[in-house]
Image (spheres, rainbow, N blue to C red):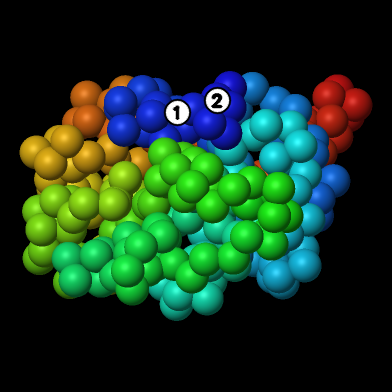
Amino acid sequence: MKKISELKKSVNAGELLVGTFQKTPSSMVSEVLGSTGLDMVCLDAEHSPFDRAQLDQCIFALRAMDMPSLVRVPSAAPEHLLNALDCGATGVVVPHVVSAEMAKTVAAHSHFGAGGRGYAGSTRAAAYTRKAMPAHLADSAAQTVVIAQIEDVEALDQIDEIAAVDGIDCLFVGRIDLTVALGAASPKDPVVVEAVERICAAGKKAGRCVGMFVGDLDEIPHWREQGASLFLLSSDHTFMQQGAASLAARVAK
């Protein structure tokens, strides 16, 4: 389990990291996941109905457990990045990053600086004015993790350029959307696997972390060999379904 202050260094060092998606907008679920040995929890605000208050409460619960929190934001809109990071998220996962120019914009809006993230000292991230501006700026630069999700054909055409963008810490493979975009029938289709390998190769060339979700855990050794080091696996929904199914099956024996 990584502490909040450790995640960015571990990401950039290429350490093996394992987290999960949280799809239920509940601080109680966050608290439970925060007590586990996972390295991070990713709140899926892209595909689940998190409003701003629920996102705030879940980040609060994870921070209370010193569990790194990522937010997969609904889009690359600056206000989504600002809200997640001001609430105290350790980092953001940004969907559908399709070009180096977009990656540069995402990186800028996730960090303080000219033309970048707007500053406020009254946020949780700034300890509600208790953290001096120099300290907040330094901590944000040292700890904020910015992950670009690669899931479009257009992104494959610029993958080396995207991987080289300063301020992007990790390329995260959106394999299901990539499967759809490539017109494939399965994420295990050779054309999809080849595309994921291209992303891994670009990350390795640029010295950039590569992350992914895989539905089949037996694939992990292959992707580790390809250079992937950050895995967001399963979800709270899956844990509940598997636990309930296992219980029913055991009692029925």
Q: Which residue is mark 1?
A: 17
Q: Secondary structure at mark 1?
A: strand
Is 242 or 88 nearer to us in this picture? Answer: 88
Query: Which amino acid type is marked by label 2?
Result: Lys
Query: Which amino acid type is marked by label 1?
Result: Leu
Number of numbered labels in the structure image: 2
The structure residue drawn at horizontal position 18% and vertical position 55%, both measured from the top left corner, is 165
Say if 177 sits above or below 142 in the image: below
Q: Which residue is mark 2?
A: 2
Distance in Å between CA atoms under marks 1 and 2: 9 Å
In the image, 187: left or right of 48? left
Q: Quadrant of residue 121?
A: bottom right
The structure residue drawn at horizontal position 30% and vertical position 26%, both measured from the top left corner, is 13
Q: Residue 212 location in percent, x, y? A: 38, 44
In the image, 148: left or right of 99? right
Q: Residue 60 location in percent, x, y? A: 75, 48
Q: Quadrant of the C terminus?
A: top right
Q: Secondary structure at mark 2?
A: loop
